[in-house]
């Protein structure tokens, strides 16, 4: 079987002489204008999960040094080269369009969490030992008023989206998350993005803002979702101007 | 080219409000950095219609194990190297 790390442009450029999962050397499978970078295995790699995540990511990071790259989801594997070539040929246009969108750009991740009170806070932000009886109580004790939370989240997200060529707000994973989002940013805008994050942190002391990256464009390998369109039964006059969720290229 | 995780208010940064966050806050930030990796490589990226090694349930399991692993071990930073922070000194 072959483990697939990424789909790249510049098929004439061989993969770097590096090793991937299970120390297998990187290899390239070429199809048309695309190159896919893979390792070959008799059995599925059995690395411990967390290490394997890093290995997969690092291979993609290395490829980003000299070409535009579409990262594959961890765990993408195919039976053989023929299956991979079929995939590349069948979706070539979509892959090339996606490579155009991510070229010269990186993904930055943002999470803003409600700040846990420190010892010096005197328990202002939250009682030291909140009486939490149910999940509902927990949510109420942590969320404050929903509207304020959403306003803060929108302020953060809008400020960063303005610096991005595309942005996607992702569903929160935990009740104390104000924002989880990904931004596709030109490489040379990254310092300005960081500075903006620091400014936002000063403006939002109630939040703990963590920005990670630059990452490969994991969250931007598909075209931006079209805005919700009216139901097919809606009359022609009801069609609204599309509001892009983040500009495309 | 790989940067370390950067934060809006790095621990110990002078002049910030709450310049030294509580240890719980730092631990939570580290947890977030690692979960960010898992979120990306497990939920993002190009999906082949063929085989996917991890089922949806598997993704949940990895998330659980990530969170469970956080407390005892220094968490890898963005590029996988342990952070050189005073609270993350290896034993």
Image (cartoon, coloured by chain):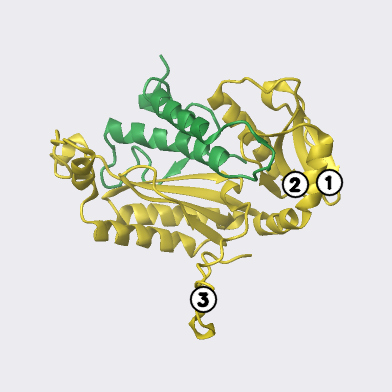
Q: Which residue is mark 2?
A: A8
Q: Are marks 3 and 1 in contact (CB under 8 Å)?
A: no
Residue A243 vs A151, above or below: the answer is below
Q: Does dot 3 land on a helix, a strand or a loop? A: loop
Q: Position of residue B30 (x, y in %)?
A: 41, 33
Q: Are marks 3 and 2 in contact (CB under 8 Å)?
A: no
| Closer to us: A34 or A105 | A34
**Residue B86 relative to residue B19: left or right:** right
Residue at 14%, 33% (x, y): give it.
A129
Name chain B's colour: green
Residue at 59%, 53% (x, y): give it.
A220
The quadrant the N terminus of chain A occupies is: top right
Name of the residue lying farthest toward the front:
A233
Q: CA distance from mark 3 to mark 1?
A: 46 Å
Q: Are marks 3 and 1 on the same chain?
A: yes
Q: CA distance from mark 3 to mark 2?
A: 41 Å
Q: Sequence-wise, which precedes: disc 3 or disc 2? A: 2
**Residue B2 relative to residue A208: left or right:** right
Q: Does dot 1 land on a helix, a strand or a loop? A: loop
Q: Position of residue A77 (x, y in %)?
A: 70, 33
Query: How dense is the environment of label 1, judged by Cα within 10 Å: few (below 14), some, or many (20 and up)?
Result: some
**Residue B8 relative to residue A68: left or right:** left
Residue A158 vs A48, above or below: the answer is below
Q: Does dot 2 land on a helix, a strand or a loop? A: strand
Residue at 71%, 21% (x, y): give it.
A23
Q: Which residue is mark 1?
A: A11
Name of the residue lying farthest toward the top:
B91
Q: Position of residue A238 (x, y in %)?
A: 48, 82
| Closer to us: A184 or A118 | A184
Q: Which residue is mark 3?
A: A233
Name chain A's colour: yellow
């Amino acid at each position: 079987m072959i483990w697939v790390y990424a789909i790249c442009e510049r098929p004439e450029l061989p993969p770097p002489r590096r090793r991937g999962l299970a120390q297998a050397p990187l290899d390239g499978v070429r199809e048309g204008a695309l190159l896919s970078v893979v390792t070959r295995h008799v059995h599925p790699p059995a690395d411990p999960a967390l290490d394997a995540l890093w290995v997969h990511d690092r291979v993609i990071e290395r490829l980003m040094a000299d070409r535009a790259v579409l990262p594959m989801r961890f765990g993408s594997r195919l039976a053989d080269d023929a299956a991979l070539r079929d995939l590349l040929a069948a979706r070539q246009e979509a892959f090339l369009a996606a490579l155009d969108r991510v070229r010269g750009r990186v993904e930055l991740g943002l999470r803003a969490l409600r700040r846990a009170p420190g010892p010096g806070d005197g328990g202002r932000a939250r009682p030291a030992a909140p009486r939490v009886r149910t999940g509902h109580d927990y949510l109420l004790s942590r969320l404050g008023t929903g509207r304020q939370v959403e306003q803060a989240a929108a302020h953060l997200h809008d400020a960063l989206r303005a610096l991005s060529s595309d942005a996607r707000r992702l569903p929160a994973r935990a009740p104390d998350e104000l924002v989880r989002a990904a931004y596709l940013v030109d490489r040379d805008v990254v310092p300005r993005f960081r500075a903006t994050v620091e400014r936002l942190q000063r403006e939002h002391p109630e939040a703990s803002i963590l920005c990670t990256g630059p990452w490969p464009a994991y969250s931007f390998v598909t075209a931006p979702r079209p805005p919700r369109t009216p139901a097919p039964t809606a009359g022609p006059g009801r069609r609204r101007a599309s509001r892009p969720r983040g500009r495309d290229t | 080219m790989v940067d370390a995780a950067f934060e809006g208010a790095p621990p110990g940064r002078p002049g910030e409000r709450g310049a030294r966050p509580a240890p719980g806050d730092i631990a939570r930030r580290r947890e977030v950095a690692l979960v960010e990796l898992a979120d990306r490589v497990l939920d993002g990226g190009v999906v082949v219609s063929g085989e996917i090694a991890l089922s949806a349930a598997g993704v949940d399991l990895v998330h659980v194990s990530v969170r469970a692993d956080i407390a005892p071990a220094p968490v890898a930073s963005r590029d996988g190297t342990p952070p050189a922070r005073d609270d993350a000194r290896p034993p």
